Each structure stands twice: as C-alpha cells, then as structure tokens.
Image (cartoon, rainbow, N blue to C red):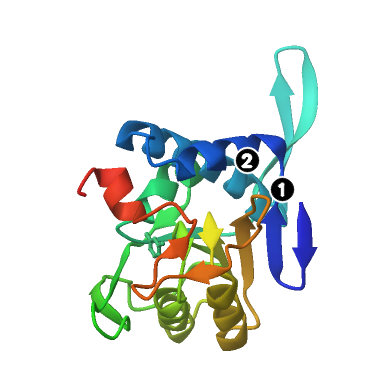
Amino acid sequence: MSSNSKVQILNHPLVIHKLSVLRNKETSPKEVRELLKELSLLLALESTRDLPLISKGEQLSPVGSYEGFKIGQNVGLFPILRAGLGLMDGFLSMVPTAKTHHLGLYREKSTFLPVEYYNKLPSTCAIEAGFVLDPMIATAGTAIASVSILKDWGLKNIKFCCVVASRVGLDSLIAAHPDIEIYVYEIFCAVDEVLTSGKYIVPGLGDAGDRIFNTF
Ligand code: URA
C-alpha cells in the first residue's frame, strides 16, 4: 500500500489482477458483482485498520483462557445508491455489526451536479467511524456532497472508499474535505487521468451501476 497525505492507494498483485478483470468490457455483471465484493473485502480490511479494540476480559477456549477483544467504535456504512451497493456486502462481511445507512444521490445529466433523492439518516448521529462506499470518484460532485451531508449530520470520522478515481475528482474531494481519508485501488496508471465530456473515467470501468445491475 502506498500513500500520500490522506489518500491510501492499495497496490497489491491480487488487487491489480482483479481490477484488471473488472475493467474488461467482456466481464459479465455476475463477475462484476463478485469482483467488487472481493475487492471490497480487501478495501474493508485496509480502511478499518485503525479501529480501536476494547477488551472483553478473560474468556475460555476449550483448552485455556485468553483475553477477548471487540471493535470499540460504532461503525457506519454509507453506500451511495446505487453503485455503492456493490461494495456493501464485502464491508458487512468484515464488520457485521455495522449500521448501514443508504444515501441516494445522482448526477444531473446536463450539469453533472449531485441531486439528493434518498436520505433516511436518524435525527442524531451515533456513528463513531463512518465509511462512505462508492466504486467511482469521477468529478467527485457526489462524493463531496455525500461527505457534506454526513458532516452536517454530525459524523466526525469519515473514510471514503472507492475502486477507481479520476485524478481531478480526487483533487476536488481532497480540496473540499481535506480532513477525510480516502482509500482507492490503484492499477499501473494509478488514479485514472482522463474524464470524458460525459464525465466518465477513462479507462475506468464504465458505468459501475449498469455493470453491477445489468442495465445497459
Ligand atoms: N460513475 C461511473 O459509474 N463510472 C464513471 O466512469 C464515472 C462515474
């Protein structure tokens, strides 16, 4: 894993292999879902590395005693509908006690500005470690808006987890929210450099939601 300031880039042979298959246009929606789940397990492992543990005191195994531990913070997952659902199951497998709050935001077609359409956050924030899930950061409009929503709600500790980011999107997200951490998978060209006029990442992997849900 390499890092610069708040951006943690996961650079591992298994990740590079899986991401390479994920990007391929011949990869089926079933495989896309499986690959995203596998990648999200690895992303969850890295992004939860600094969760605190609390002791459960002495416990018994069949042959002796040991000190038990459990995660010491309330973890919240915030998948951005709909592509963020592709990362949710992997995170939930790793942190089954997490609370999941879906956020619905879409990019308006002509302005590319984010429009919020679903938000059922409870009135007070009891989450101590929040993980925003979205496979793609393109312009970062949606990412910036979702982090703002969570900050306004009262969430202090936010990590943004994604699979492919554009350079310009990452820079925008860091500029808008310099206090959050961002985890992103890297393949040789790292963070992809190109955004099309329709704001798709090149090479990217296409429309992640369409590829997960087979809605081309
Ligand atoms: N969202 C996607 O799903 N893909 C992109 O390339 C950009 C935004």
85 lies above or below 201: above
Q: Which mark is residue 62?
A: none
122 lies above or below 163: below
Q: Residue 11 carries which label?
A: 1
Left or right relative to 36: residue 82: left
The image quadrant in which ligand 1 is located: bottom left
Residue ID at (62%, 62%): 191
Are the residues tagged 2 and 1 within 8 Å (C-beta)?
yes
The kind of residue on which mark 1 rests is Asn
The kind of residue on which mark 2 rests is Val
Q: Mark 2 points at which residue?
A: 15
Q: Dividing the picture into quarters, in which one does residue 181 lie?
A: bottom right
* Visible residue check, residue 118: yes
Left or right relative to 150: residue 110: left
Q: Camera-side residue: 95 or 216?
A: 216
x, y (%) of residue 183? 62, 60
Left or right relative to 87: residue 66: right
Residue neighbourhood size for the residue with mark 1, other residues' Cα within 10 Å, grouped as few (<14), some (14–19), many (≥20): some
x, y (%) of residue 84? 39, 56
24 lies above or below 2: above
Residue ID at (63%, 40%): 15
Q: Dividing the picture into quarters, in which one does residue 33 lie?
A: top left
